Image (cartoon, coloured by chain):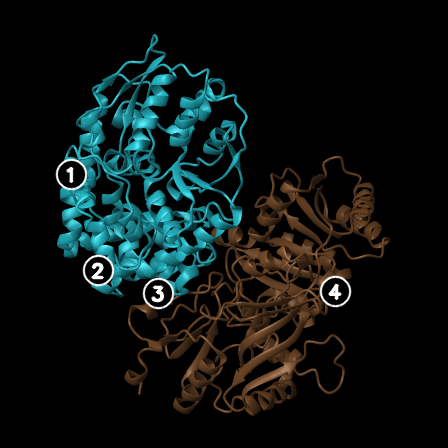
Chain colours: A cyan, B brown
Amino acid sequence: MSTSSENSLSLIEEYYEEQIIRCMKCGMCQSICPVYYEDSLETGCARGKLALSEALLHGKLEPNHKIEMIFNKCLLCHACAQVCPVGLSPDKVFAAARAEMVKRYDMPWIKSLIYRKLLGEGKLSSLTGTLSLANRLKLFVLARSLSIPKIFGKSAIRLSFATLPDIPSKPFLDRFPELLEPNSKPIGTVGYFVGCAQNSVFQDVSEASVNILLALGYRVIIPKDQGCCGFPHYGAGDFETLKQKIIQNSSAFKKYKLDAIIISCATGGSGLKDVYPEMTKEDNLKTLGANVYDISEFLALKHLDDLKKMMPTDKKEKIKITYHDACHLNRLQGISSQPRQLLRIMPSYELVEMENSTKCCGEGGGFTFYYQNISSSIANRKKETIKNTGAKVVALGCPGCRAQISGALKQEGLDIDTKHTVCLLWDEIKKGKDSNF
Amino acid sequence: MMKERSERYLFDSERIENNLADKNLPFGDETPYSITYPESNKDVLEILNWANKEKLKVIPRGSMSSLSGGACALSSSLVINFSKMNKIIEIDTHDLVLTVEPGAKLKDIYFEVERSGLYFPIDSFSSYNGTAGGAAGENYQGMRFAKYGDTRLNTMQIELVNPVHGIVTLGGKTVKNVSGYDAKIAWIGSEGTLGIFTKLMYKLMPLPEKRTIITLPFDSIDVFFDFKKKFDSLKIFVSALDLMSSKVASYISEVSSKYLSFVLIEGRTLEVERLKKEILKFAESNKAQIFEGNDFDFMYKKRLNMGEKTLNDKLFADDVTLPIKTCSDFLKFLEGRRYDFLLHVQDGGVLVFRKEPPGKNDDIYEKVLEQNGSLISERQLGIQPKRELFLEKMGSVYIELMRSLKKAVDPNFILSPNRYIF
């Protein structure tokens, strides 16, 4: 693992100085950036932030809180990287720049509480307990009605929090055993990486994922001592906790002999597949002991025909469904056709594509709290494109997008459900007469 | 004075993030004195009135995608950034007119216009990220000039602001509008030296029914010009007919020949099919590649992004125009100097790619003038070194006439200083 020097800009220098210098200021990033689309300021897009990074590196500018906020004004959606003719990944530069700012100013107490305490501790029990308690006491509803601006403000996700499903008091990791055997002779052994959101709030996704893997005949191992993937820390510039998370998850998974590690969280998958190798300079086989697959990628690649046989055969009227491409799934992992393949085999649904399905929903971790108006505007555009399809369900593969989009839809009182692809798939399997279950 | 206006004018780090050197020039990297983001023509008027009173230089900026330094800041200048005036105001499907604010991105215009079943034929080397105002200020046109003309010929009406007359409208929305001077022509391509656009109306046309790209490999310049002679017998302009050296061609395709010709055909299906057949027959090549449907979209996008690729390889892109009959000789001259090139065969525009930017008296320019060519082709003089040579060539009468026009609308010479001949 790389270590940082004493130089104040060491993290940017260490990882990305060459990227900053190579930016030729063509502005292609400007034409695709969802943040720039909303605020039309050079600070919104990568080019402006790279110009600032360069000025910081060359001592033309001293770091300050204003610049810190400018670096926070990025969704890390990776859209700029996709169009950059030079092949830069500006989002990675900004994550490093945020880390520089954390090194210099540390985190505000609320961020520190969330990232270092709730997401930082091993089993994530406090996160689940806190969210569950807050939900039961209707604290989110209270916060919403009081419009506590600094915490929830006007963001779409605020509404999402206020209308969260019932959160079990126990995290998924405490509810499920470490080792689960299928009903038949195992066809392989896979590890399941749960992720914070699906360990606490969206436990339906973890349940569906594990049940599908068991139904297909896999032995499923859910290491108890796994933690947060670290991507939220990466995005928040807390590289120290990120490094601890890599070590924790590495030791949790490496002790098993696994054919694959499956994850059903787009952000977590990006963390494991993209950030871990970036930070450790090693591949996942070496860091985690097996290759990492998103659940939709794994199922579409290896079991599409098996799953087809598990689908219900009774013919009912199809429900229109549309699919949102989460940035962390589509851009960072290159997964866009696989979830659609799964949706197309489900007889209860008819897939209708929305316009700009790959455009970010505006969630972006802490972005939604820092830049609530921009985040909400982006979410509203997404909501309009969803509405235009006439779909009754939005399928996706990311808990952040799920919270953001469901919040935006509920804000307008629309009767459109937001579900993870595997939850829909598991519902279909349960309905299927030929299911192995 | 400045402090009172701090809400409109940015002085802090925003100046630094707007320190955007032109990607094609090794200079012009200055942090502006201040930045401002107007949201209406009245904002622009207020800004210009104040700047004129203070004698503060102003530089309008779209997306800063120019290749000649047109939007580069001076350390003493106020940059007027049009990113907040980016609306597509109207796509009139009856009169076939597009009305936009100057900050509207061409990428978004193409999308919306084509969605309405219409076509906006202006493009440029930086069209993916260029803006409507940039297209007018720089008089954009790229590979399709011969068939569709440049921005000047495709503009119906402009609304602009200058420090003397305030908000001025030139031209009209109707097609037949013949009386008096067509003054708007002088403003298109004026690089912001005569006024600042606040609204533009462009001509549209029906969306071509079919679009096809053909690439043809050639191993000698003479063989290509033999092909061109046969092509000329069709007496028709295709949307683009380019010849590029292998390095330039490698940005869009795998190339095993010394040169590649890129042909873009647009029109009714029957017409496109007929032309395609004739061109393949003339080319006598079994290595021609045809791109249609999704393949077309992929190849077309690569072609539009070619400029960025050359810049990424640190190739300086210069442009000149030659009489078409002398193009063959000129390309051989370039080869002798190991320069890469892209020739728009139907209009004689040549993009010359080289590792070092040319100086004022580069021998390319000598050759161009010797062959009665033009020192510029599809981009403006901006802050390029060849401005000086252009001034010498145009002579004092031309300069005096242009200065008289400039004085009439900008007596303090605050608009876009150090551009064009001012």
Using the rendered image, report if marks 1 and 2 lie on a common chain: yes
Dot 2: chain letter: A
- Cα separation, mark 3 vs mark 1, equals 44 Å
The percent coordinates of residue A278 (x first, y second) are 30, 38
* Location of residue B331 by image quarter: bottom right
Reading the image, the residue beneath label 3 is B17
Dot 4: chain letter: B
- Cα separation, mark 2 vs mark 4, equals 73 Å
Using the rendered image, report if marks 2 and 4 lie on a common chain: no
- Cα separation, mark 1 vs mark 2, equals 23 Å
Q: Is residue B166 left or right of residue B373?
A: left
Task: Classify 10 Å Cα crowding around label 1: few (below 14), some (14-19), many (20 and above).
Answer: some
Reading the image, the residue beneath label 4 is B323
Quadrant where the N terminus of chain B is found in the figure: bottom left
Q: Secondary structure at mark 4?
A: loop
Reading the image, the residue beneath label 2 is A146
* Residue type, label 3: Glu
Asked if the residues shown at circle 3 and circle 2 are in contact, with their CB atoms under 8 angstroms apart, the answer is: no
Tag in front: 3 or 4? 3
Give the numbered dot on residue A129. Answer: 1
- Cα separation, mark 3 vs mark 2, equals 38 Å
Tag in front: 2 or 4? 2
- Cα separation, mark 3 vs mark 4, equals 42 Å
Dot 1: chain letter: A
Task: Classify 10 Å Cα crowding around label 2: few (below 14), some (14-19), many (20 and above).
Answer: few
The residue located at (24%, 63%) in the rendering is A59
The percent coordinates of residue A1 (x first, y second) are 21, 36
Tag in front: 3 or 1? 1
Which of the two discs, 3 and 4, labels the residue nearer the N terminus?
Answer: 3
Farthest right residue in view: B233
Using the rendered image, report if marks 3 and 1 lie on a common chain: no
Using the rendered image, report if marks 1 and 4 lie on a common chain: no
